[in-house]
Amino acid sequence: MNKKLIIVGGGYLGAELAKSLQNDLDVTLIDQRDAFVHVPAMIRAIVTPALLDKTLLPYSGLLSKGKFVKAKVTHIEEHGVTLEDGTQLSADYIVIATGSTNGIAFKPVGNSIDEFRNTVEETHAKLIAAKSIAIVGAGAVGTEMAGEIAQAMPDKTITLVSSETSLFPTMPDKFGHSLAKKLNEFGVEIKWGCKVENLKSTTQPYSGTLRLSDDTSIEADLIIPAIGSKAASHLSDSLPNVCKSSNDRVNVDEYLRPSSFANVFAAGDVADSKDAMTIVAISRQLPWLTKMFKALASDQDLPIDEVLRKMKPYSSWKKAPLLLPLGPEKGNSYLVIGTFGSWVTSKLKGKDLFISKYRKLFNL
Ligand SMILES: Cc1cc2nc3c(=O)[nH]c(=O)nc-3n(C[C@H](O)[C@H](O)[C@H](O)COP(=O)(O)OP(=O)(O)OC[C@H]3O[C@@H](n4cnc5c(N)ncnc54)[C@H](O)[C@@H]3O)c2cc1C
């Protein structure tokens, strides 16, 4: 009989891992929502809400052999999890893949997909009504958001507030310079090296005045906070010897384990694997986890640590790729071998935003 694996959270890590292991282990994937949200497409969905129909993907089509349970997990122990209604499910192995939260129109907060759809549509309505827009945070999400709005709605006045003096300062100079030039050509003003001193909400769009650290201010009909993700890591609090790092991520050992339980793993945004909180990072963790669980499945009678010792520990990206579209046609990509411009970025990501890939994963 196959051993039982419970994966808590059906985001990028959980959904794909469950599908790749369903023939090797007795897999149960648990998520609080009934549909997967293809997050990178939400930036464009705020501009074009019709995209929601193609990017909210029901879990019902994901697994053929594994089991999907729609429920919120409230507690994790060494050999099982407890659901919100008190049901207990036992497991030999557990993966915590509860991910992170971000702005309310970028990623859902609770368990209702309908509510999330409404939030995106309401944000779109506010965007349509706004003449001036200020985006706070010039990381990947803020920069992409500025580009999406600017190319689709050229009549808007858009300001992007960056706390740095260049875009993506840890990337090769060409990458950030070229993106800044393209945004300028779209008419986006970038406020460099400024911190917002009175941000009213870190997750909800609102209208008002931003006071900046250079003593200037920006009045905007719509302020969109884009200041990063926060890990949804509270379930790990009950495990022994858990430590957290920045943004509430849980520290993990070289085999992606957050506690002294040998059979409990954590990966994706929730785990500080020394990778960034990205799908690109998950694309490196998934093959390692799949190989590791297949080894555990075929050596069922050996102690877990003995199987793991035979494997190469997980190693994070040294310098991860980054694809940054500014709408369907423009953008820049850093692909480790070099920096590429609009044509490559549009082909690899801008046009389709990997929607086809994830629809296929969900058998749509
Ligand atoms: C707007 C935006 C655009 C992005 N674009 C890109 C991009 O282009 N490329 C890139 O590499 N990265 C991108 N990212 C980052 C990417 O979205 C995250 O890295 C990714 O979502 C992390 O996946 P995950 O599986 O760790 O968690 P998540 O995707 O956050 O999924 C976690 C899942 O766990 C479930 N869950 C949480 N708690 C519980 C519980 N208690 N019980 C049951 N279920 C639970 C949630 O419902 C959710 O489905 C973007 C992020 C944002 C906000």
Image (spheres, rainbow, N blue to C red):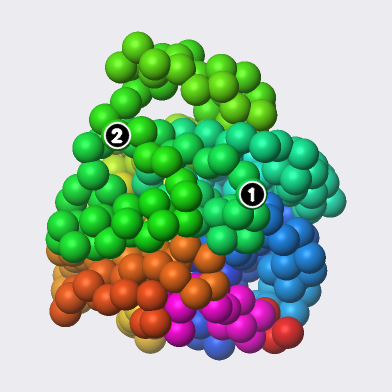
Query: Where residue 195 sits: x, y (%)?
Result: 34, 23
Q: Which residue is mark 1?
A: 155
Amino acid at pointer 2: Trp
Figure quadrant of residue 74: top right
Q: Which residue is at a point 32% across and 75% down the rendered structure image?
A: 341
Magenta portion: prevailing SS class: helix
Q: Which residue is mark 2?
A: 192
Query: Where residue 267 sits: x, y (%)?
Result: 40, 57
Q: Which residue is at a point 56% across and 22% down the rendered structure image?
A: 219
Q: Nearer the viewer, mark 1 or mark 2?
A: 1
Q: CA distance from mark 1 to mark 2?
A: 23 Å
Mark 1, other Cα within 10 Å: few <14 / some 14–19 / many ≥20 = few
Residue 335 higher or lower than 126, as above or below:
below
Q: Which residue is at a point 66% across and 80% down the rendered structure image?
A: 359
Residue segment shown in magenta: 345-360
Could you tell whether 316 is left or right of 45 in the image?
Answer: left
Say which quadrant the C terminus sits in.
bottom right
Q: Nearer the viewer, residue 289 or 318?
A: 318
Residue 240 higher or lower than 253, as above or below:
above
Amino acid at pointer 1: Asp
Does residue 80 show up?
Answer: no
Does residue 169 show up?
Answer: yes
Indicate the secondary structure of the residue bearing disc 2: loop
